[in-house]
Image (cartoon, helix red, strand yellow):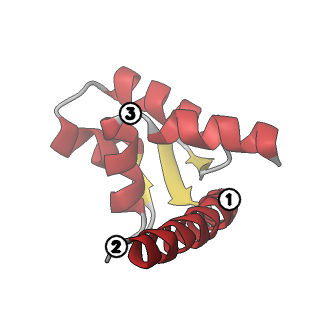
Amino acid sequence: MVEDLDGVFHALAHEARRSMLRRLSGGELTIGELADPLEMSLAAASKHVKVLEQAGLVRRTVDGRRHVCRLEPRPLADATAWLRFYEEFWDTRLDALRDVLEKETP
């Protein structure tokens, strides 16, 4: 699972790919539809989609000349679970620190 998270976080590191994922949350889109608002070529958009595919975040189907993309939620759920663990870890630590500091403050 950790190896898979490396690809997910790598894919999420680029704003264009985050934008594509955001738009795909509304439903399937072609690569051309993903490229248009980003003002990038189809070739550039396709490269970004390939990174998203390799991370398992997007599934692409080919219908003739149309490449249709859809969001795959599982890798994002795995990343969220990983982040939640550390959020809870640090919340607990910070709560304990607050308690210590409150006891020491007159």
List the residue tagged with mark 3: 14
For disc 1, the neighbor class at 10 Å (few under 14, some 14 to 19, many from 20) is some
* Label 3 vs 1, first from the N-terminus: 3
The residues tagged by marks 2 and 1 sit, at their Cα atoms, a distance apart of 35 Å
* Nearest-to-viewer mark from 2 and 1: 2
Q: Is residue 76 visible?
A: no
Q: What residue did someone put label 1 on? A: 82
What is the distance, in whole Å, between disc 3 and disc 1 at their CAs? 20 Å
Which of the two marks, 3 or 1, is nearer to us in this view? 1
Q: Is residue 54 above or below residue 56?
A: above
- The disc, 3 or 2, on the residue closer to the chain's N-terminal end is 3
Q: Position of residue 37 (x, y in %)?
A: 17, 45
Q: Amino acid at mark 2?
A: Thr
Residue located at (38% from left, 33% from top): 14
Viewer-nearest residue: 36 or 54: 54
Vertical placement of residue 95 versus 69, above or below: below
Q: Residue at x 53, y 70 (%)?
A: 91
Amino acid at pointer 3: His
Q: Residue at x 31, y 49 (%)?
A: 19
Q: Tell me: 65 left or right of 3.
A: left
* Image mark for residue 105: 2
Between 31 and 71, the one lying in front of the other is 71
* Residue that appears at 20% across and 38% down: 38
- Left or right for 28, reference 105: right
Mark with earlier residue (2, 1): 1
Verify CB contact (< 8 Å) between mark 3 and mark 2.
no
Residue 13 in picture, x, y percent from top left: 44, 35
